[in-house]
Image: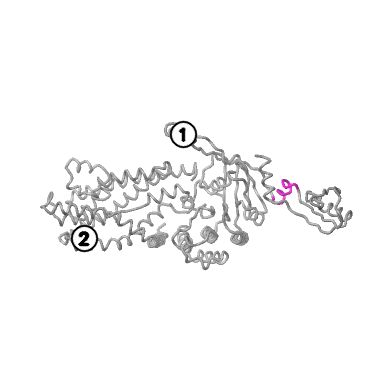
Amino acid sequence: MFRAFPTLLRIGLAEAVAYRAELVIWVLTATAPLISMFIWDRVAEEGPLGGWGQGEMARYFLLTLIVRHITSSWVVWELNENIRTGGLSPMLLRPMHPLVFFVAQNLAAMPLRAVILAPLIAGVMWWRPELMWTPEPWTVALGLLSAALAWVIAFTVQVIFGSLAFFSQQSLGLFNVWFGLWSLGSGYLFPLELAPDWLRQGLLWLPFRATLATPVELLAGLVDGPSALRLVLAQLVWVGVFLGIAALTWSRGVRRHEAVGA
Amino acid sequence: MIQVNALSKVYPVPKRGEGLWGSLRSIFSREVEEVRAVADLSFSIQAGERVGFLGPNGAGKTTTLKMLSGLLVPTSGDRVVAGFDPSKRDPAFLRRITLVMGQKQQLLWDLPPIETFALNRALFGLEEAEAKRTQEELIELLELGPLLTRPVRNLSLGERMKCELAAALLHRPDVLFLDEPTIGLDVRAQVAVRRFIAEWNERSGATVLLTSHYMADIAALCPRVIVIAGGALRYDGPLKDLAERYGGGRKVIVRTRDEAPEQLGPFVREDGALVARLPSAEVTAAVDFALRQVAVADLSIEEPPLEDVLSKLFAERT
């Protein structure tokens, strides 16, 4: 598998380049953090909100935009399509797990995403230079680890919903429900720090923040050491939970596929 | 190479009534009907054989190929392919087989075929130098040279099929399951694919099990045929014997210089000529008889069209 991975990444990148127009649209549709940033910027204009001025707001939403794209995946649509149309069959007849191919495909598009995002990032930094900060090396290291874990959770959740296509034609509908809840609970539209205490405490027990707010807050230097470790630990727990569920839905789904065909 | 013993496959198929009421009812009470796609099928195929797998639509051909390649698990019965139980989809097994389904593309749609070849070389963990040699051989045999750098979406159906075959054979499998490899292709592309399959079988010694609705494919490629209908075995044997048994024999047509009689031995008059339908063994005697009895202007012997033979076979038993 490891010998094949560089080739898979190269082909994934070639595919991303072939689909570049689609990718640009895709990236631009996921720029909601920029809209949120402009709204919250106006709110913070009157004076700091919960200790957050315009610089902190811009920093938070810029990092949200970046982490959202680092952790982005589209395997739920790929699986849904391939399971329903029988495209999964040739993949099952290759001596490598089909999900390895999708992992490579999703990771390989990252450099191109970065290129598309770069002008947006530069624009935000020019517009609100006070967002700049000097992060501690440990928050950067832990933040990057946390972003990687967030990607694993986001990808695995999509594999779970994608695998539901083995059983139901409504898997994408169910994923949309998840996405709606995720938008509200992950810190995507508003910083969880500014949410009422009861909501913030409640969201700590749900998986959404682990896929976005955790790495963003770590990279922004908003969290102290013990809290940072607790949050990363929570991410590891979610990784375990979702990997377990994904392994179960995938293996049950493939067994069903073998029983009833595509 | 392939052993199939009492193989059966039953699919649960949901039943739904007509109209809005039918849709609403299906939400609350889900009726399931059992459809027997393959019933008690047994056969064996030796290494290097080319076998045609025939049957009408819905006969269970594709289901059988999927069970032999490990995509479907049978309801009952056993099968062994290249010494493996296909259900496990053991990587060592997957390296020894290939399944080409006419309409199911494994080619990467927006990239040139050469990228799918690279992907398959990586996925199958092939030794680079040897895989490249096989790739060159396939490119030459299938005349893929000019197609390699064009995106798959810009290729014609025939060109895509040829690339599909090359991608499926890069790992030099011992067993080829080909499901309608010439479907939708024009006559020239059909001939090219057919010629390639025969050539590859001779070069590599691979076993070929092929389904096709084009009888020309079967006639050109398969000395042996297995016929199924309604999921059950109808015939397993040489293609020529199939024509003999179900085709009503070979057709001997004698055109006479003078007006032909109404009847002459085994011959009867049809459209001004003497015609007899006879088993192969009786053809020589009948020709000899005609030559002695009448002044022959022209003589021809026709095989029964395979399509007629099969439709007779399907109609007879189903």
Q: Please state if A141 lies on the left or on the right of B220 as rendered.
A: left
Q: Chain of mark 2?
A: A
Residue A247 occupies which quadrant of the picture? top left
The amino acid marked with disc number 2 is Val
Q: Please state if B191 lies on the left or on the right of B290 as rendered.
A: left
> Could you say where residue A206 lies in the image, as x and y percent from the top left?
26, 43
Residue A59 seen: yes
Query: Which colouring convention does the figure follow?
Result: one colour
Determine if marks 1 and 2 fall on one subunit: no
Q: Secondary structure at mark 1?
A: helix
Q: Chain of mark 1?
A: B
* Residue at 32% in and 43% down: A177
* Residue at 45% in and 45% down: A254
Q: Which mark is residue B22?
A: 1
The quarter of the picture where the N terminus of chain A appears is: bottom left
Q: Which mark is residue A124?
A: 2
The amino acid marked with disc number 1 is Gly
Q: Residue furthest right?
A: B293
Q: Is residue B4 above or below residue B182?
A: above
> Could you say where residue B153 lies in the image, as x and y percent from the top left?
47, 60
Region of the chain picked out in magenta, as a range:
B238-248
Task: Judge the density around disc 1: few (<14), some (14-19), many (≥20) Cα neighbours within 10 Å.
Answer: few
* Residue at 49% in and 42% down: A260
